[in-house]
Image (spheres, rainbow, N blue to C red):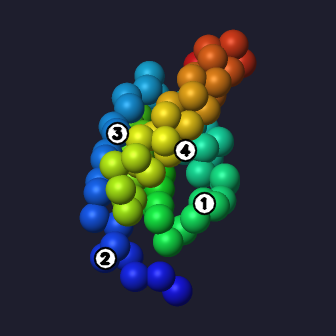
Amino acid sequence: MFDQSTLTYKLEFSIPFQNESQSTIARNSLSPDPILKPDELNVTFSSKANVLNILFEGSSDKVIRVAANNVIENLKTVIECIEVFDQH
């Protein structure tokens, strides 16, 4: 078990979607990926109403930057899929 107090750097995104269903789809699509170095990074995905919240907690700004960049790329793909397949 690692000491979470070493994760002193934080970054939070709040991304609004058109509806709650879309924010839930995005959360469920992004959250299954395991963190490779949990002693250096923790990423929490949550959704409330139509907003997806992503909290990054890391041991350095570089760790958070790399993780956030990866999540943004994956989020782009999720949004493109929602645009094509979600008929709400």
Q: Identify whether 53 is placed above or below 17.
A: below
Frontmost residue, 23 versus 57: 57
Pointer 1: what residue?
35
Tell whether label 3 touches label 1 (CB within 8 Å): no
Going from the N terminus, do you reach mark 4 or mark 2 first? 2
- Estimate the spatial distance between the alpha carbons at disc 2 and disc 3, rounded to whole Å: 21 Å
- Percent of width and height locating residue 70: 56, 37
Pointer 4: what residue?
27
Based on the displayed image, in which of its 4 quarters is residue 57 positioned? bottom left
Frontmost residue, 52 versus 63: 63
Q: Residue at x 33, y 37 (%)?
A: 14
Going from the N terminus, do you reach mark 1 or mark 3 first? 3
Q: Amino acid at mark 3?
A: Phe
Tell whether label 3 touches label 4 (CB within 8 Å): no
Left/right of residue 64 with respect to residue 70 in the rendered view: left
> What element does badge 2 sit on?
helix
> What element does badge 3 sit on?
strand
